Every structure is written in structure tokens, then in C-alpha cells.
Image (tube, grey):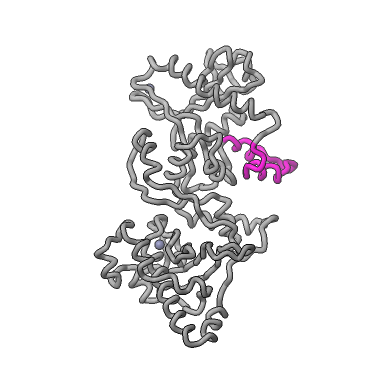
Amino acid sequence: MVLSEVRCKTWFRKDFRFPDIYHYLVGKDGYDEDCLRSYKSLEGFRLFVDGHVEDLNYHDLSDDETGKKDGYCYFQFKVKPTERSKTEDGKDFYWGFIVLQYTGSIYSAYCACKGGADGACRHTAAALFDLEATIRRNDSETCTSVSCFWKLLLHCVALQFITKPPVQAVSEEELLDQITSADIDYEEIVEYAEVYSLKELADIFVAQNNFESLENPTYEHCSSFLEFLHHFEFATEVIFQKTLSQSTSNSEFWFSQRAGRIAASNFYKVCDMKETTNSKNTAKLLMNYCPLSEDSTPYQLSWGHEKEVAAIKEYLKKHRTKHRGLEVFRSGLIVDKQYPYLGASPDRIQVCKCCPKTLLEVKSIFSKRNLQPHVAEAHCLDVVAGKYYVKKETSWNYQMQGQLALARLEQCNLIIYTLKGILVTC
Ligand SMILES: [Zn+2]
Ligand SMILES: [Zn+2]
């Protein structure tokens, strides 16, 4: 890379050294004490020596207003791929970033390559070695000449201020309970994963592109943001597990992950938008700026949550004898790797020994609690030969279809609950 492109403030320069890289990498996938002792044979080090790190830009994340120097600094890097001239998805570079703490220790790192989500791929390592060498060199130069230091600032591409360092993270320990109790198809050890909300990614996107603000994005802005999202390997399992371990009603993480995603429960609203629909209101809804609609006071919502449990109990009572080993599990937020801006959180997942996994969606409407379920929701139901089906052009059908698509399943049962009983659709 061009060494002079890194701009480092004096308070920071002295604090990043090889031991910081060592402490960060040791124990991560593919790194142990031995290989770090002979770090010169590491792939990442080779990439650095061979000049694959093309770009390393700096931005100070410490608090500008108070001037406190206890913040973070953000480095964005670009690394040329090794043999082939393009990356896995056809780009000329892998891009990623490193976040350092004031102390010099590495807070987090990310690379857009396949193995980059754990922040320890060869591209990230190359960028770390490059950064270390750059800072070391800057130190020795600025010791003797102040003008050298100022020269370093010349080509700096200052990123805009990012309001918040990425902090959403979850340790394997936090997940362990969930992993053993849940129904899992395969096991994957997650040591430490960064989980960004779409809002944080939008901030990073705006900062990277030096946009003043994106209050009224153009079509091009939107499509390049989607393109930007596709660079990310979303930690969908972590999102699922962490949202599973927290109750949805009071989880900040759950809300931050839901904000900006089109949730299955809003699919109909979005698909049904017309020329005349106020898109700003729809966007506000998707951003969770107005989480409560007019007809759902907190009391009515909590009534719904409470009745969800009662409905599932009733359902199990009636269906236990029809299946072998019937069990139901809660679900976390399901995010699709391919369409990371979509999300679904089914009420329950049903597992038995005789049928494929099935989703359960519970509906209980406070204002209709005293009606028979088939009367209460007659406008959403078709009856064929005594069996109830959800009508196609309803928000519930769109929601269930969306949940099925994102969960990669094929069957979803709708349970309508009132104080008079439950109704299960086919
Ligand atoms: Zn990488
Ligand atoms: Zn069954």
C-alpha cells in the first residue's frame, strides 16, 4: 500500500505493535503460538510483503465533542486477491476494516471474503501487518522530523464520523444453553462474532462513500447500498440464536436487528404499496420508528403475547396424539444470507418424528376475543369441505409464505385463538 495514506494521531502512534497482532490472532481459526512465532511464513504476512495491501484509510472514532481520547479508530483496507485477479464474487479487491482501541488492542476486524467474518482471514492479517509496519515507520520518521509526519497527512482520505463503533457481539458461552437445547441440524463453533444492524451498516456505507447524508437517496444510492450489503457474510446463525435467547418484547438487540429489515409480517404491506401509498410512512414502519399501530396499545399487545402461550398449549393438547414425539420450539429472527434485508420470526417451530418441520403462527386479536375463532376472522378464511384455509390476498398469507421461504420449510399452521377456543388452518 501507499504508506503515506495512513494518518495516525500522535496519541495513537506509539501504541500498536506486533504483540497486539499476536494477542488478537492467537487462538483464532488457523493461528496458534507456533505459527505466530514464525509469522513471516504466514499467508497474511506474505501478502503484506508482496504488496497486496493497496489501501488503508484511517478514521478516528473517538468522541469529537468532548475530545476524549478513549475511543476507537477505524481503518478501512483493500487487499488484492492472491492467484486469480478477481475475488470470489468477481471484484478486484477484498475490502474490510479494522477497529482499534485507544490502547492499541484490536477491537474487531472484518473482511468481505468467505473466511473473513471472524476477522482473522489472510487479508485482515495482511492489513494488520501493514498497519503495524506503517506505524513503526511513521514513529521513527517523526522522531527526527516533524515535517515527515505532516507529509503523511496529505493523501489521507478522511472518512466521515461514524457515530457508534460496532459493538453487537455475542460470545460462544452466551449461546451454549441455546445450542444444546435447540433443535439443530449441524453444529458450528462460533467463538466470537460481530453482528451489525442494518442501521450500523448504513452508517458505514454513508461514511465510506463520503455522502453528506442520505435523507433522500436516489435509485443509484439504494442499489449500491444493496450491492454493499452483498459484500457481507451475515452471521445469520448468531442473529437467530441471540434473538432466540432474548424475549422479543424487551430485547434491544432484537429491535436493532429488525429495524430496516422487511419482516414477513410486513410483506403484504410492502407488496400492496400503490402509487398513492405514503412510502415514508412505510419506511418508518420498517425502521421501527413507530412500533405500535393505533389499534395495539401495550396492554393489547401483552394480551396477545400471553394468549400465544395459551394457544400453543391448546394446540399441543389437541395434536399430541396425531404425531409421534411432537415438540414445539421458539424461534429467533431468521435472516436470509442471500436477501439479508428480509427477516422472519415465526411464533413456534413444530418438530415431530412423522412429519417435516412445521411453522406455527398464532393470531389472537384482543378486540375479537369473545367471538368464535372462525367468526372472528371469517374475512381471512376460506372454507372448503369443512376445512379452513387462509385467503391468498391477506396479510397473514403473505406473512406465512414469507416465513416459510426464509425458514426453507414448506408447512405453516395458523392457529387462531379466542377465549372461545382455537382454530387451526390447513
Ligand atoms: Zn479476507
Ligand atoms: Zn407428525
Q: Is residue 215 left or right of residue 21?
A: right
Does the magenta-highlighted stretch encompass residue 277? Answer: yes
Residue 192, position as x, y percentages in the image: 40, 51
Is residue 257 among the parts visible in the rendering? yes
Q: Write the residue at 59% across / 58% down.
A: 163
Residue 225, position as x, y percentages in the image: 58, 56
Q: Write the residue at 33% across / 47% down.
A: 189
Q: Is residue 24 above or below residue 273?
A: below
Q: Is residue 160 above or below residue 293?
A: below
Q: Is residue 75 above or below residue 351?
A: below
Q: Is residue 346 above or below residue 132?
A: above
The range drawn in magenta is 265-291
**What number of labels is visible?**
0
Does the magenta-highlighted stretch encompass residue 288? Answer: yes
Is residue 85 among the parts visible in the rendering? no
Q: Write the residue at 36% across / 33% down.
A: 181
Picture quarter containing residue 238?
Answer: top left
Q: Name the quadrant of the N terminus.
A: bottom left
Toward the viewer: 118 or 94?
Answer: 118
Q: Write the residue at 39% across / 69% down.
A: 126
View extreme (right): residue: 276
Residue 368, position as x, y percentages in the image: 65, 18
Q: Is residue 279 left or right of residue 84?
A: right
Q: Which quadrant of the figure shows ligand 1?
A: bottom left
Q: Is residue 379 left or right of residue 176?
A: right
Residue 102, position as x, y percentages in the image: 49, 65
